[in-house]
Structures are given as C-alpha cells and as structure tokens.
Image: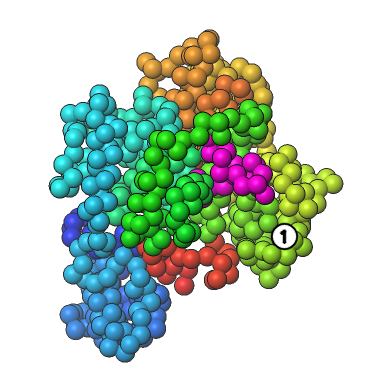
C-alpha cells in the first residue's frame, strides 16, 4: 500500500547506520547475487563491493578479499543481508581511514553514512525543533484527535514519537493548505496497525508533494522510524508554505506599494513568495534609513541589525491606507488557468529536477525548465550541448532553448501546429499550458506502457484503453456506474471514482462517509475524499476537488490513469513506489543529494 517500499533490518543499531536510499540500493545488490547463484557467500562480496562508488578508488577486489579473510577462512560461507551490511560498514570505516591518511576525500563521504560507530547522522538544531514544536502546539492544540497528545514538550523527543503514526503530519499539511487532505481518509486510531500507519504516511507524502514540498528522498519507512533530520526537514517545508501563503498580491493586495516606478504590477505578481518578502523587507528598511541591501534570510540578517531597523520602520503611524487601493481587474486571475498552472508547477517540482519552478508562465520562458522535464520524462531527448543554462542575457539563446523544446515535442508527436519557440519566450499562456499538458499526458501513458511491456500486451496506451480498463474494473466489482468519456458530466458526482477506488482496493473506501453526489456540497465532499483516498493508495496527483466537480477533462484523465497505474503496478509485482524517471543531464547540470551517494552505485 505504501508509495515507498521500506527495507527493514532486525538490528535497530544497524538500521540506524543507513538511509532507506542506501538500504534499498544495497538490498538490490544482495538480491541480484542471490538470484544469480541461489545464495550469497563471503566470496561473492569482493566483486560486488569493488564496483561500489565508495570503494572503487580505494580498494581493489583483491584488497577487499584479503580484508574479508581476516575474519573468516571460509570464503564459501553463506551470509544473510545483515552480515552483508556489516561487512559494508567495516569496509567503509577502513576506506575512510585510508582516504584520510592519504589526504583524499572518500567517494560518497558526503553521504549520511560517516562511520561504523555513527548513530545520528545529522545534528539536530534544538532551537529549530523548539520553534516547530511551538508552531504545532499553537495550531493543532485544539484538534479533536491530537489534543490528547499536545502540547509537546520541546525538550524531549515527543515530537518524533508522535510523528510515527502519520496523523500529526497530515493534520499539519491541512493547517498549511486547508482541505488538502480529507480527514475522513486519515486512520485516526490510538494504536494503528502497520498497514494503517503506512497508509497515513503515504497520504502525507503525496499530499506534501501536492502543496509544493520536495519529498524526493523521503520514504514512508523514514517517517515510521521518525528520522529526526528528515522529519524536521519536512515540517520545515510545510510550515514555510503556510507562512508564505499570503505573501502575494492576490491575498495581500497591499503589497502593490512595493511596485517601483519602472516596474509593472505583473512583475511583482510573478515573483516567488520569498522574493516578495525580501522586496517588502528592503522597501521598509530603505524608508527607515537602512543603507544595506538584504539579499537573503541567512548571512545578511544574522547580526540582527536589519531586523532592528525593520521593527522601527513598522510603527503603526507609518501605515499608508491610501496606497492599498488597487484595481480589482489587475488582481483577478482566470480561475481555470490558475488551477492548471498550479497543477503543472507541482508536477514539475515533484519530478526532482534541479531547477525549482515558482511560476510556470514566467519560469519556462527561457526553455531551461522544460528541457529538464523533458530529460526526466524521456532521457536522452535533450541535446545539452545546444542548450544555454540560466541566467541567460542574450534573448536569442532563450529562443534556441525553446526551439529545441518545440522540436522535441514534435518528435514525441505533440500537436504543435504553427507553434514556435518564440511563443514560449513571449509567455503565451494558452500554448504553454497546451504543451505541458501533452508532456504530462505523455509521461503518464509512458508509465502505463512500460508496465504493459512486462506482459504480452506491450503496446501503445490510448485514452480508450484507460476508459475501458476503468469501466471493466467497476463492473467486475459488482457496481453499475460507468464513464462514457473523460468529459462525462456524470463523473461530477464522484460516485464512479469512489467505486473505481473500491474496485482496485476494497478496504480503502469508507462508504459510510460517502455521499450520493446529488448536491454541490455532496459533490465537493466526495471529490475531496476521492483525492485523499487516491493519494493514500500511492497515487501522485495534483488536481483539486473543483476539477472533479467541473469534470476537467485533462485532470480526469490523469486521475483515472494514476489509479490504473497503481493497480497494474501491484498486479505486476512492482511494489507500491512512486515512479521517478532517471536523470540524464550533464554533471554540471544537476547536484546529487547527500543520501544518493550509495544509490549512485547502482548505476556503476
């Protein structure tokens, strides 16, 4: 049921020495040898370990064999996975010592794994933890379920203990972005079983992605174990999203006073919230006579001087209500366009590309982000030698990037009649949405096609195939509702998707909280529940309840295809992990996360 399959080790100390990324990678190495030879022996390890990134420049295969023979004379002795891990730890410790003595940095030494005696891989900032605990106590103290556990004492590890059942983080996500999770989908029990706990964590991670958090290297098992640095990292992102939610012109039109004489309101609207906050801070600091420019919220403010000036500047008598009047037409977004921009932005950021997307219509205009997405979805499709990385000063370089984007789209058979790269550079919203929709659809259908390729049915997937699959699933479960197309207005009630979710996993839908879908209120209740239940299964989706209620054809297709992908993935024994396509960009184009050092060995 989990969207991330955890690797468990019976020895808690041994488990604590590795991240889940490392455990999954090493487990795959172990299983590969066992599958090939029927068992794993001490004699098999030198060939495996010598190819790992951590050892490749330090030890030869013979070196590793000699070190292993120090502890055993029987190289044909069969070993289990835990012995395999302990051997790795021992070698890693020796490799660290050897590299240190030679003045060289050990490959992979930036990973969470430091030495065989390391229990905690990251120092926890106690003041940071305290601030998050205070935030949680303040905003969730009256929650019906959590009030029995709150307030949390920041001087203890109670926060991490409370995180383990998955309820707290789900509730915190709803504080940050209300109604993201339908709380009827959360398993709220005093003592949830492992299955229910895993469902909560899967729901949490998919919902966190849906509000803009980066969770590429966090799995459900990491939350079950409540790894402090990962838990605090996730909480930090959720709290940040909550605190910056109103830092925009739509929710805080008073910010219009930040627009300079030489700027347009549209420029301010397209800034990321953090950039708006910096602009706001510098605006008031300038009025207070502060001569320095604050460019970040770390080194530039660490001495407290800027904050002292800011507090002085924010005296109530300096308020200027007249400056708060703005034209309503300038603030209004087309609702449909805004929702689709949000969906594509969250989808792009969920792929784990190096560049973060803050505003689709602005950030894609130089072509770079779309090239990164294309390289994720279709590895090798981008010719990076012909691409220019931002910042790009020469306008024609942006056009070159976007021309390559269009050409790759045509190679993928996108419908791009009379569309040129300059249309993207000019920020044509209609064309940008049309391109990204085709790219998202291509990615989803490719996932389904790859699953089918494991069977004799390996062929192209069409919209008709998805509709037929969904209808067959519902019919075989004994239900009567059917969908005629992705535009079928009857889908607005939500009943069909409730029956489809129940058909692929009967226990996941609680019919007692479902509605008939006859009124708008019923439809919204069903729609919010559908989205949460799908995420609870492991579907990575970014639509809103309104997309179901209004039968948004694009989002309905993605929702149905995501459920189909989850179901087929389970059928083919592919586990319940969320797909992340491989990276195929040049080395200077992307930075590896610390805990991917061991994972990188899998590609050696």
In the rendered view, does 35 fall on the left or right side of 391? Answer: left
| Coordinates of residue 577 in the picture (x, y in percent) | 43, 47
**Callout 1 environment at 10 Å: few (<14), some (14 to 19), or many (20+)?**
many
**Number of disc labels:** 1
Q: Residue at x 38, y 32 (%)?
A: 174
Q: Residue at x 72, y 46 (%)?
A: 427
Q: Is residue 499 above or below residue 457?
A: above
In the foreground, 392 or 84? 392
* Residue linked to disc 1: 398
In magenta segment, residue 578: no
In magenta segment, residue 269: yes
Splitting the image into 4 quarters, where does residue 469 fall?
A: top right
In the rendered view, does 322 fall on the left or right side of 197? Answer: right
Residue 604 visible? The answer is yes
Residue 350 visible? The answer is no
Q: Residue at x 46, y 72 (%)?
A: 604
- The residue segment tinted magenta is 251-275
In the foreground, 223 or 44? 223
| Coordinates of residue 311 in the picture (x, y in percent) | 36, 46
Tell me the SS state at disc 1: helix
In the rendered view, does 601 fall on the left or right side of 222? Answer: right
For the N terminus, which image quadrant? top left
Q: Residue furthest bottom?
A: 102
| Coordinates of residue 292 in the picture (x, y in percent) | 46, 60
* Colour pattern: rainbow
In the rendered view, does 392 fall on the left or right side of 43? Answer: right
Q: Residue at x 67, y 63 (%)?
A: 392
| Coordinates of residue 54 in the picture (x, y in percent) | 36, 75
Q: Residue furthest top?
A: 518
């Amino acid at each position: 049921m989990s969207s991330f399959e955890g690797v468990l080790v019976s020895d808690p100390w041994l488990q604590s020495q590795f991240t889940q990324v490392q455990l999954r990678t090493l487990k795959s190495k172990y299983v590969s040898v066992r599958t090939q030879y029927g068992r794993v022996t001490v004699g098999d390890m030198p060939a495996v370990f010598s190819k790992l990134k951590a050892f490749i420049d330090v030890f030869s295969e013979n070196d590793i064999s000699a070190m292993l023979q120090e502890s055993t004379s029987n190289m044909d002795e069969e070993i289990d996975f835990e012995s395999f891990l302990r051997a790795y730890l021992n070698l890693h410790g020796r490799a660290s010592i050897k590299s240190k003595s030679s003045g060289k940095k050990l490959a992979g030494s930036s990973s969470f794994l430091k030495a065989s005696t390391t229990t905690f891989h990251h120092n926890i900032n106690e003041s940071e933890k305290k601030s998050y605990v205070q935030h949680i106590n303040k905003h969730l103290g009256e929650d019906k379920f959590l009030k029995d556990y709150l307030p949390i004492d920041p001087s203890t590890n109670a926060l991490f203990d409370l995180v383990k059942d998955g309820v707290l983080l789900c509730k915190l996500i709803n504080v940050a972005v209300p109604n993201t999770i339908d709380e009827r989908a959360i398993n709220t029990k005093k003592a949830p079983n492992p299955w229910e706990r895993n469902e909560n964590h899967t729901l949490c991670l998919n919902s966190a992605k849906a509000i803009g958090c980066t969770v590429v290297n966090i799995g459900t098992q990491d939350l079950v174990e409540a790894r402090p640095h990962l838990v605090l990292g996730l909480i930090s992102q959720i709290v940040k999203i909550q605190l910056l939610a109103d830092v925009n012109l739509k929710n805080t039109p008073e910010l219009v006073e930040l627009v300079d004489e030489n700027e347009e309101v549209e420029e301010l609207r397209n800034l990321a919230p953090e950039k708006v906050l910096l602009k706001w801070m510098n605006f008031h600091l300038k009025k207070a006579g502060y001569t320095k420019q604050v460019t970040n919220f770390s080194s530039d403010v660490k001495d407290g001087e800027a904050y002292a000036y800011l507090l002085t500047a924010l005296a109530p008598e300096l308020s200027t209500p007249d400056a708060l009047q703005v034209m309503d037409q300038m603030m209004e977004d087309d609702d449909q366009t805004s929702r689709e921009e949000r969906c594509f932005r969250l989808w792009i950021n969920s792929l784990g590309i190096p560049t973060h997307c803050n505003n689709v219509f602005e950030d894609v205009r130089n072509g770079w982000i779309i090239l990164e997405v294309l390289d994720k979805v279709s590895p090798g499709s981008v010719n990076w030698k012909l691409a220019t990385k931002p910042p790009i000063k020469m306008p024609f370089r942006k056009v070159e990037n976007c021309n390559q984007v269009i050409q790759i789209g045509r190679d993928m058979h996108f419908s791009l009649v009379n569309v040129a790269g300059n249309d993207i550079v000019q920020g044509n919203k209609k064309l940008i949405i049309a391109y990204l929709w085709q790219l998202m659809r291509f990615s989803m259908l490719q996932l389904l096609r790859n699953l089918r390729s494991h069977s004799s049915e390996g062929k192209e997937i069409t919209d008709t195939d998805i509709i037929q699959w969904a209808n067959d699933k519902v019919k075989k479960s004994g239900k009567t509702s059917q969908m005629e197309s992705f535009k079928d207005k009857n889908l607005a009630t939500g009943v069909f998707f409730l029956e489809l979710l129940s058909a692929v996993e009967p226990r996941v839908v609680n019919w007692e909280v479902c509605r008939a879908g006859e009124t708008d209120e019923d439809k919204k209740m069903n729609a919010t529940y559908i989205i949460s239940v799908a995420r609870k299964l492991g579907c990575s989706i970014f639509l809103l309840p309104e997309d179901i209620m209004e039968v948004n054809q694009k989002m309905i297709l993605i929702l149905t295809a995501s459920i189909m992908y989850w179901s087929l993935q389970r059928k083919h024994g592919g586990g319940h992990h969320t797909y992340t396509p491989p990276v195929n960009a040049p080395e200077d184009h992307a930075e590896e996360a610390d805990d991917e050092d061991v994972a990188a060995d899998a590609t050696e």
